[in-house]
Amino acid sequence: MGISWLSVLQAVPWSDVISNAPKVAEGARKLWKSAGSRDVPAEDAAGPPGSAVDAAAGPSADAAVAQLQVRTRQLEHAVEDLREQLQQSTELIKTLADQNTQLVARVEMNRVRLQRTLALAAAALVLALGTLAALLLR
């Protein structure tokens, strides 16, 4: 026996969903902002202006070390950004998982209630048919 979509939607604890919606939206907004700011422009990826070594003159050891230090700082910053993004993603996933758990618990509770109601309705139908049969046989 299938449950109609209307009864499923009525079973959803909309007050909980609505009260948690701003938290989920804010988490998604932060995640989207942090993911959107990850794009490194072409000039930043090459390092700061003036750090490029003239290929014709040949790179000196100091210039190469300075360029590696700049690149290392950029990579460290990128790793830190990824850690922050991972933390925000984890918080958002946890919030969504908690809401999902609440929804599943409510659906299960309503399924059990529906089974009990159907059993009571079947018993009432049998009782009504028995009473009707007894009245007709008199």
Image (cartoon, rainbow, N blue to C red):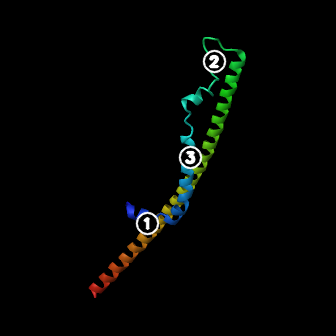
Residue 10 marker: 1
**Residue 80 left/right relative to 125:** right
**Residue 10 left/right relative to 69:** left
Decide: is 119 above or below 25: below
Work out how far the residue at label 3 is from the one at label 1, CA to CA, in angstroms: 31 Å
Circle nearer the viewer, 3 or 1: 3
**Residue 30 left/right relative to 123:** right
| SS under mark 1 | helix
Crowd around label 3: few <14 · some 14–19 · many ≥20 (10 Å): some
Q: Can residue 50 be seen in this view?
A: yes
- Amino acid marked by disc 3: Leu
What's the residue at 57%, 37% (across, down)? 38
**Residue 49 left/right relative to 133:** right
Of residues 110 and 100, the one nearer the viewer is 100
Image location (x, y in percent) of residue 60 = 69, 14
- Amino acid marked by disc 2: Val
- Examine the image and state in which quarter residue 41 appears: top right
| SS under mark 2 | loop
Decide: is 106 above or below 66: below
Decide: is 100 above or below 14: above
Of residues 37 and 86, the one nearer the viewer is 37
Which residue matches tag 2? Answer: 53
Which residue matches tag 3? Answer: 31
Outermost residue on the bottom side: it is 138
What's the residue at 65%, 23% (across, down)? 51
Work out how far the residue at label 2 is from the one at label 3, CA to CA, in angstroms: 37 Å
What's the residue at 63%, 45% (across, down)? 87
Image location (x, y in percent) of residue 103 = 51, 59
Give the mark nearest the N terminus, 1 or 2: 1
Q: Is residue 3 visible?
A: no
| SS under mark 3 | helix
What's the residue at 60%, 43% (across, down)? 85
